[in-house]
């Protein structure tokens, strides 16, 4: 006897055919139901169930199983699926991937639904036999629609789950498995209670828990399904999406609860109210100015009256000079000549002040507007920034009227130097963009307007360390005068190299004059102006301020890539080593020095020091002095390491203020108390 059986396509081994038939028999729902009932009968000593009558014809084409497998994973067909093969699907159900409700499962349904094709014959079964089977199905449809308790007692597959969901939405024509010829003769157990088609089918909690507790029941088994006729294929029921499951609904509800409502931030009514409030404030200011000043002065105000006028309209005292000049130029024209006898009427001031307040809602905007319109600059009046040429009239009035600068009024040759010092310090501290254009945003972030308010309260101008201190001006100008040998207010590279006894390295001097920090016309010619020297001296003596850190970082970043790399640091350290060798001073190798500096700065990226790393470091003065100021480097090496720690109980004083106070005492002592730096 041959060990193989030849089918219409290919030979199948007998052992494999027997194994496949046994597995298919074991996977039939009726077989599992009977086995379960028989097991219960043995346990309870009850009547055994009736035997199952199977059909004698059973196809083993392909087998559906390639080898003995467990039922914890879907089987894989051993026959490669060809486009022309009539065996497209083993079930008329729509399977869900992993029985997980959601979009992925529905997409899988659509894919399998689209893959079905019309097949007139399956495994040699003619169409007439299918018609007989369909008639038998119609008789048994009521019996098939049992309660979901029947599901818990018989194995099911993921395709059965989607069939149960679909039957809820399509009760009249429920979607059921089309049984094969073998299953027609199988007795079907009757439901425990009658089922009404008029009553919606609802799953019970018991059935749901049963499906979850028996993972083996959720497996799709291989079934032999006869093909439908073309008319049945056309009249197939349409899938209706089932209701959202509890799990999906919970996720949607959780997602909705996690959404935060953005509070309303646009209030057009409040803007109208703010405009009306601003108009009321302007009217109050003008009424007060008219009643308390213009009426008493016979509607004629001179420049000396604008100090009180500025205070009446909620400005500080030293706004008075640019306010008067801007008002006169607005009333009389930009070509008007201002003399001590020039006067203004209330109507002229009212028109100007309303124009100022129309588009300038805070003092920063008003200050920029007034200084621009009082300036002698040839730039446009419609700009929103200040340049270094817009401050002369404003600072000159402080020299002429502040009690702390009374001794300076007679030394008129120093007025322009004091003005340049003040302007340079304003832009050094406020112009964070290094653009020489002071914007309203930069002015708001600075403390300049607050310092300006202090001027009217503090008679000793030296107690105001920011911008206006005369002592600081004295120190800066004396240091510049010492190295400016020809006194043309311009110094060259050799002059700057003499600063502080040649403490700054030659390589750093070259970097300063290379245009790394200034691209002014005189710097291109190898000359440094007094304005640029102010920036240099403050940066040299206070290496912890933001502008100073940026100043020296620009100088040390030779390739301009925003990173101080090892070769750049070694380039500057080599000159320090050379000087120490000349002086016979023991020095650290570069490898040890760079390890010390990296531990000091703690950069985010290893061996790459960026500007933000230095700004985060609190000891940048030690870092910079190590590479280009030998004198301060040696002082730092011999200093107590805890001396750099600041006492939290004492007010914070910058290194620049300490230096200026010390140098001012030394300079005045050497000059015998003479405040004129041009003498001697």
Image (cartoon, rainbow, N blue to C red):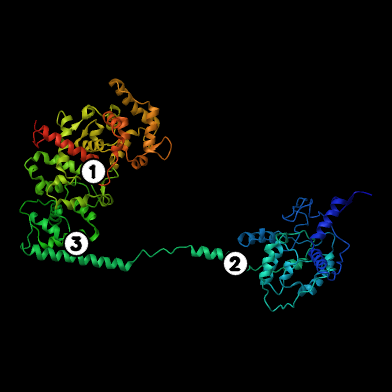
Asked whether 533 or 640 is in front, the reply is 640
Q: Is residue 13 visible?
A: no
The residue identified by callout 2 is 246
Residue 637 at x, y = what percent? 30, 30
Marks 2 and 3 in Cβ contact (< 8 Å)? no
Label 3 vs label 1, nearer the camera: 1
Residue 86 at x, y = what percent? 78, 57
The residue identified by callout 3 is 354
Residue 219 at x, y = what percent? 72, 59
Q: Examine the rendered structure and indicate whether residue 86 appears above or below residue 210.
A: above
Cα–Cα span, label 3 and label 1: 42 Å
291 sits left or right of 188 in the view: left
Label 2 vs label 3, nearer the camera: 2
Secondary element at tag 2: helix
190 sits left or right of 322 in the view: right
Label 2 vs label 1, nearer the camera: 1
Q: Examine the rendered structure and indicate whether residue 20 appears above or below residue 491.
A: below
Q: For residue 653, which numbered disc appears in the image?
A: 1
Q: Quadrant of residue 666?
A: top left
| Residue at 34% across, 42% down | 615
Asked whether 397 or 67 is in front, the reply is 67
Q: Residues within 10 Å of mark 3 (few under 14, many from 20)?
A: some
Secondary element at tag 1: loop
Q: Which of the marked residues, 3 or 1, is nearer the chain's N terminus?
A: 3
Q: Which of the marked residues, 2 or 1, is nearer the chain's N terminus?
A: 2
């Amino acid at each position: 006897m041959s060990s193989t059986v030849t089918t219409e396509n290919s030979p199948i081994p007998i052992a494999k055919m027997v194994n496949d038939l046994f597995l298919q028999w074991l996977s039939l729902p009726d077989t599992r139901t009977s086995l379960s009932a028989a097991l219960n009968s043995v346990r309870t000593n009850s009547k055994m169930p009736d035997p199952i009558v199977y059909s004698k014809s059973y196809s083993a084409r392909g087998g559906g199983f390639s080898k003995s497998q467990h039922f914890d994973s879907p089987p894989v067909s051993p026959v490669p699926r060809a486009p022309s093969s009539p065996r497209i699907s083993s079930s008329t159900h729509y399977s869900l991937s992993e029985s997980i409700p959601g979009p992925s499962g529905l997409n899988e349904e659509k894919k399998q639904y689209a893959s079905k094709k019309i097949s007139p014959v399956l495994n040699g079964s003619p169409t007439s036999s299918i018609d007989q089977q369909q008639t038998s199905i119609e008789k048994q449809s009521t019996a098939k629609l049992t309660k979901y308790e029947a599901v818990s007692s018989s194995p099911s597959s993921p395709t059965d789950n989607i069939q149960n969901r679909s039957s809820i939405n399509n009760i009249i024509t429920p979607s059921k498995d089309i049984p094969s010829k073998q299953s027609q003769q199988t007795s079907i157990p009757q439901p425990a209670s009658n089922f009404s088609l008029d009553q919606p089918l609802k799953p019970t909690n018991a059935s749901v828990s049963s499906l979850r507790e028996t993972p083996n029941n959720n497996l799709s088994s291989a079934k032999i399904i006869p093909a439908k006729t073309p008319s049945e294929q056309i009249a197939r029921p349409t899938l209706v999406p089932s209701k959202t499951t509890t799990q999906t609904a919970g996720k949607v509800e959780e997602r909705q609860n996690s959404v935060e409502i953005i509070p309303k931030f646009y209030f057009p009514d409040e803007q109208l109210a703010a405009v009306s409030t601003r108009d009321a404030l302007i009217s109050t200011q003008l009424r007060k100015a008219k009643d308390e000043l213009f009426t008493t002065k016979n509607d004629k105000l001179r420049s000396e009256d604008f100090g009180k006028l500025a205070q009446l309209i909620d400005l500080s005292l030293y706004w008075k000079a640019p306010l008067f000049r801007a008002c006169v130029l607005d009333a009389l024209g930009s070509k008007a000549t201002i003399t001590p006898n020039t006067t203004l009427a209330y109507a002229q001031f009212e028109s100007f002040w309303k124009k100022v307040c129309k588009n300038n809602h805070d003092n920063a905007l008003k200050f920029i507007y007034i200084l621009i319109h009082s300036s002698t600059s040839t730039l446009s009046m419609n700009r929103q920034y200040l340049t270094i040429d817009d401050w002369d009239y404003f600072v000159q009035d402080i020299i002429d009227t502040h009690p702390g600068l009374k001794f300076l009024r007679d030394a008129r040759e120093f007025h322009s130097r004091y003005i340049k010092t003040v302007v340079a310090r304003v832009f050094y501290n406020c112009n964070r963009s290094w653009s020489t254009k002071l914007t309203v945003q930069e002015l708001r972030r600075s403390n300049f307007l607050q310092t300006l308010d202090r001027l009217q309260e503090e008679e000793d101008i030296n107690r105001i360390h920011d911008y206006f201190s005369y002592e600081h001006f004295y120190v800066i100008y004396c240091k510049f005068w010492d190295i400016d040998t020809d006194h043309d207010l311009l110094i060259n590279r050799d002059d700057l190299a003499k600063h502080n006894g040649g403490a700054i390295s030659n390589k750093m001097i070259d970097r300063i004059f290379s245009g790394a920090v200034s691209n002014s016309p005189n710097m291109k010619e190898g000359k440094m102006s007094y304005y640029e020297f102010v920036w240099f001296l403050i940066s040299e003596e206070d290496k912890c301020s933001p502008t100073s850190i940026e100043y020296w970082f620009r100088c040390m970043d030779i390739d301009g890539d925003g990173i101080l790399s090892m070769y750049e640091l070694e380039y500057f350290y080599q000159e320090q080593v050379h000087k120490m060798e000349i002086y016979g001073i023991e020095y650290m190798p570069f490898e040890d020095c760079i390890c010390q500096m990296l531990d000091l700065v703690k950069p985010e990226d290893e061996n790459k020091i960026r500007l933000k790393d230095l700004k985060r470091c609190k000891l940048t003065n030690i870092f910079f002095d190590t590479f280009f100021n030998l004198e301060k480097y040696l002082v730092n090496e011999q200093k107590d390491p805890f001396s750099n720690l600041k006492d939290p109980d004492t007010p914070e004083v910058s290194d620049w203020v300490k230096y200026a106070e010390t140098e001012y005492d030394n300079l005045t002592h050497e000059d015998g108390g003479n405040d004129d730096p041009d003498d001697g």
